[in-house]
Image (spheres, helix red, strand yellow):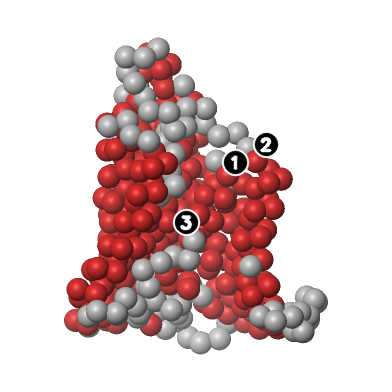
Amino acid sequence: MNILIDIISSTVLFAVPLMLVALGGMFTERSGVINIALEGIMIIGALASCLFMRFLDGIGFGPAHPLFSMLFAILLAAAAGAGFFLLLAFAAVNLKADQVIGGTALNILAPSLAIVITWAIQGQGETTILIPTWARITRATLGLSEGGGFLSDLIYKNLYLTTPIAFLVLIASIILLYKTRFGLRLRSCGEHPQAADSVGINVYRMRYAGVTISGVLAGVGGLAFTMAAGSGFQATVAGYGFLALAVMIFGNWKPINILGASLFFALFKIIGSYSSTLPFLPDFSRVNSSEYIYLMLPYVVTMIVLILTSKRSAAPKAEGIPYDKGKR
């Protein structure tokens, strides 16, 4: 029973950053801007929020008010991610620069910037920022007594504030994208920006909006990943930004599909981590470095799924094409 609780709770824990970041990528690409800078935005969001939590922990506010402290950290991660990603928005929308090159540049800049900042604050060679224990929501955090059975153990095993926020974001994304005029305008700018402009929609403004939402969600996703990893901030998110891109494509740029894809990839990651304790998995102990075989599983599955689904994926038609108002 304990192993089942561990697998389910850990799957949800690692699915949350994937879902948040993939939803962020969806909003950007639905507006017509290619977003491969998710990895870099996650790093910047995680860096800002982890430094802030370290500060709150040092002054004693964090342990005294854990929920408020986590909420402030999430807001800061969102602001940092959005601010950093506006660099790409300016280059892609105003300067009409190549969006792939711009995203690649941000992915290279982010870890270097994170190392410089952490070294300046903590000393040379010190890049790790530990996550304080009060960041995790426990029964004591909410003033509840211990115990409660299977469901209670499942909920509180790996519960962070980012988890309920992520599912609220999912619901909000569905409503925003399909039930509002903003969502219709955003999607029209990604499919046919000239037609959208002809009926009075400001394509530049909508693309800036899509990029800003993406930066907010990817920044929070970076914080969620850092807490899920458990080892603190280390100037990297272990390729999760690129994995989120695969989730977005596998989910066909649709929120519900992205949820399913996130859980799917997270499950394979957890199976890889718990491979030694799952008796139904084949034993590769006779193979040198056999522990890495199952750790490769989520990335191998990613490549296989993309190969099988790429032809059926329908990306926004104007994705990656700089909009020129004078061109019809």
Q: Compare residues 206 and 322 and report the one nearer the observer.
A: 322
Q: Secondary structure at mark 3?
A: helix
Spatial CA span between label 3 and label 1 = 17 Å
Residue with the mark numbered 3 = 241
Residue drawn where x is 67% and y is 36% of the image? 312
Image side of residue 142 versus residue 267, left or right: left
Counting from the top left corner in percent of width and height, residue 255 is at 54, 45
Residue kind at label 3, given as amino acid type: Gly
Residue situated furthest bottom in the rendering = 146
Q: Position of residue 316 (x, y in %)?
A: 52, 31
Name the image quarter holding residue 223.
bottom left
Sequence-first tag of 2 and 3: 3
The label on residue 312 is 2
Q: Is residue 59 above or below residue 268?
A: below
Q: Which residue is mark 1?
A: 252
- In the image, taking residue 149 as reference, residue 178 lies left or right, namely left
Q: Which comes sooner in the sequence, label 3 or label 1?
A: 3
Residue at the image position 24 percent from the left and 75 percent from the top: 119
Identify whether 34 is placed above or below 96: below
